Amino acid sequence: MKVLKFGGTSLGNAARMQDVARIIESEKDCIVVCSAMAGVTDCLVELSGTWKADDIKKAEIIKKQLFSHFEATCFGLMQGAAAFESSHSIIFDQFHKIDRMLSGSWSEGKEKCLLAQGEIITTLIFDHYLNHSGIAFKWLNAFDFMQKNAEAEPVVADISNKLSNLPAYTGSGRYLTQGYICLDHNGHPDNLARGGGDYSATLIGAAVNATVIEIWTDIDGLHNSDPRVVSNTSPVRELSFGEAAELAYFGAKILHPSCVWPASAQSIPINLRNTMEPLSAGTLIRKGPSNAGIRAVAAKDGISVIRIRSARMLNAYGFLKRIFEIFENFRTPIDVITTSEVAVSLTIDKTLHLEAICNALHELGDVEAETGQSIVCVVGDVLAEHQGYAVKIMDALRHLQVKMVSFGGSRNNLTLVVPMGQKAEALNCLQKALFTNEPHACQQAFNN
Ligand code: ADP
Ligand code: ASP
Ligand code: MG
């Protein structure tokens, strides 16, 4: 069994959907996982905002735009009036449901039902098109087998059990389902967070012990830096699971932050492919030692640095434990940490409880919080000391305000924190220093 996931841009309009149909028509045993058409989840998030604010006029405008977008897609896909009519009625039915939802009051739970409509309507339209084109796929409703546990985490064994108990799923043949959406522990609609389609794909891949998980998107694999910020990036052809997990977690948008672990736990290779260039090899992520040298750089915005300074830390044991307990109580993960004899600096990206965390930390010493930072993570064999990577990295960023450096936690990353406004400069300088032969070019540009 193979799992193929197609992201929003891969299904972004009728022509793209037809490209995807051509890619999957020759597959035999597979589960195809689809995201919402590009822009649709953003639109639904906006619609939810207007619903919450009781802005009925704006809600109507957004709903109309969304409806027209789906309608145009059906029109582009379906030849003939009858075929168009039947796909059109699918959208009509779903928009009736949306209208019914919006006529009630907003709640977080109802918002999740609304957001799920992006994946649901997209797969309904695509499924209808496949059937109409004689490419038979069996429909799987993700709500029937994707569920989180009491800790709000998806569990591969539970997904596997639920899937194998579904009458519609026999373990062979071709299936179509939705990414991103799932049920919570109580059986209410939930999701795997923005970009969660990748995570759905690797969870399903692990649940069926797939031979490979293909993640099809709009770029020819994972690039050595963020192509939205750096102009001369190039694809990395192979990555170890560890390297890919690090890059995903620290901001490489092409992969959901948590999506590597389900595949790596079962050594299932992940192949990142480009829908627009289906013949390109993309990036293969698999079990193996990291390759020599630096592989790629990723960055994550919206980071807060918290510094705790206390003389009580000097020669004391148990101090770090008390700090960590506070973060545990607020269910807030720590990303980067550095310590000195009397101070600890750490970073978080979930700021919901920032104030409460700082208040609790005050019991232990002086606390300072700084928001608006970025983590820049260099991934690869950075400990290949003879090649002097650490020196190269620090030298490339010497003109920037590096707030924290974490090095040696694992063989394959060096992580820094810089102000968000300096992220682009940091990524461009690292690109020049690590992947081209132009050391110091950035710094000179900066000095001029
Ligand atoms: P999809 O809709 O298929 O899930 P995403 O937009 O989530 O696609 O991810 C693909 C995008 O990720 C690319 O278009 C690219 O702009 C961005 N991206 C950010 N960092 C990287 C990287 N290191 N390598 C490749 N793409 C990246
Ligand atoms: N549709 C969701 C989003 O836009 C999930 C995904 O695309 O993976 O975030
Ligand atoms: Mg994505």
Image (cartoon, rainbow, N blue to C red):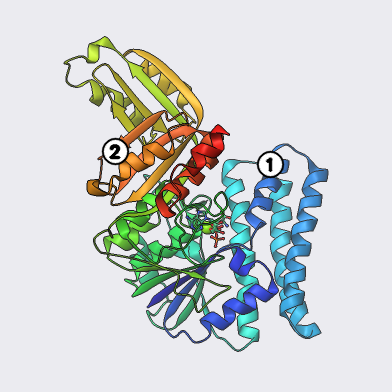
Q: Position of residue 98 (x, y in %)?
A: 70, 55
- Say how many tags the image has: 2
Secondary structure of residue under mark 1: helix
Residue density around tag 2, few if under 14, some if 14–19, many if 20 or more, within 10 Å: some
Q: Residue at x 55, y 64 (%)?
A: 7
The quadrant in which the C terminus is found is: top right
Q: Position of residue 202 (x, y in %)?
A: 39, 63
Which disc, if any, is residue 13? none
Q: Position of residue 420 (x, y in %)?
A: 53, 34
Q: Is residue 349 above or below residue 233?
A: above
Q: What residue did someone put label 1 on?
A: 49
The quadrant in which the N terminus is found is: bottom left
Confirm or reject: label 2 Cβ below 8 Å from ligand 1.
Answer: no
Which disc, if any, is residue 407? 2
On the question of residue 391 being in view, the answer is yes
Q: Position of residue 254 (x, y in %)?
A: 49, 57
- Label 1 or label 2, whichever comes before in sequence order: 1
Q: Label 1 amino acid?
A: Gly
Q: Is residue 312 left or right of residue 13?
A: left
Q: Is residue 56 left or right of residue 365?
A: right
374 vs 361, nearest the viewer: 374
**Which residue is the extreme one toward the bottom?**
134
196 vs 124, nearest the viewer: 196
Q: Residue at x 49, y 64 (%)?
A: 142
Confirm or reject: label 1 Cβ below 8 Å from ligand 2.
Answer: no
Q: Is residue 292 left or right of residue 57?
A: left
311 vs 77, nearest the viewer: 311
On the question of residue 148 being in view, the answer is no
Q: Label 2 amino acid?
A: Phe
